[in-house]
Image: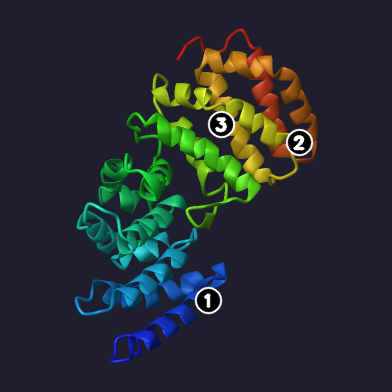
Amino acid sequence: SNLRGSRSVEGKISLLESLFYIVVPKENKVMASSLIAPVALDLITSKTEDDSVKLSALRLLIVLGDSSETGNILFDAGVYAVMRKIVDNRDSVWNEISKSALDVISNMCLYRTANDKLQNAGAADFLQEILTEPGFPGLQATLALTHIGNHDFEHAEFPSEKIYLLTDLIQNAIDGDVIYGIKWDLIPGPLSAIKYLVMHANRRSTVYRHLLDARIIQQLLHLLETDCMDPTEMEVALQILLRLATVSEHARQMILFLEHTLQQVEIHLKKYSKAASLAGSLSATITSYDSIRSEL
């Protein structure tokens, strides 16, 4: 009620910032989402509210969406519909409000828990239209679109520059670089984006060729040799390599050329049972004469 009342702009921003820090811990997001989202939407859609207040409310929704448990809650509160309307009604130049609205949608997509509702609401077509945008909006659309796919969802041909951007972002995440003001996680993030991209793309898609041209195989094998990835990240990296080796003879030959590196990775991963099993499956795939013969 304090936020909806006649409190000053500075007072509203102060209160929104306090709420922001309260909901940063993941354990507070679920309980807070259903209470805070309607109030935040009131502020964002107000015709009289100051833009600085709207940005603070959007920042609150961004952090609420950064959870695997809040996607459905936010969608049911109307967050996706309002954010999409903001993006659709933007000027030709992206401003902070429209970029923040897209950021909210991206977070709702990244955790995949609201996929059915997002797909039914036309999120894939909406994101596809933004995919070719330069800079941060195009990157956010790329990450979001890859994460809302499933086996019934066919990716359109992804622009090669976005695939190069995802592979570069993997290294940025490993190095802890700040890109567009963000320190990126690998999962959900560029590593999981590439996983869903290769899992859902048609075997003859140009996605695979672009990934090979971007040296994704060498990059993932190099990462697997290090101690900077956790077991889940290792498993995802190996799932990507296994998929590439399965659908592309060219990829299989590339990995076979690096077989010694793969053997070292397999030894390194012995302490991670599932990752070690995936590495063993990849070794078997690249040395099998029965591998898929298709050439991309």
Measured as percent of width and height from the top left, residue 43 is found at 29, 77
Rounded to the nearest angstrom, the CA distance separating label 1 from label 2 is 38 Å
| Residue at x-position 40% and y-position 52% | 109
Vertical comparison of 243 with 162: above or below: above
Residue at numbered disc 2: 269
Circle 3 sits on which residue?
Answer: 240
In this view of the protein, can residue 144 be seen by the observer? no
Front residue of 177 and 229: 177
Q: Residues within 10 Å of mark 3 (few under 14, many from 20)?
A: many
Q: Residue at x 39, y 78 (%)?
A: 35
The residues bearing labels 2 and 3 have C-alpha atoms spaced at a distance of 16 Å
Picture residue at 79% right of the left edge, 40% below the top: 271
Q: Amino acid at mark 3?
A: Ile
Crowd class of label 1 (few under 14; some 14 to 19; many from 20; radius 10 Å): few
Q: Which residue is mark 1?
A: 21
- Colour option used: rainbow
- Three-letter amino acid code at the position of disc 2: Leu
Tell me: 74 left or right of 278: left
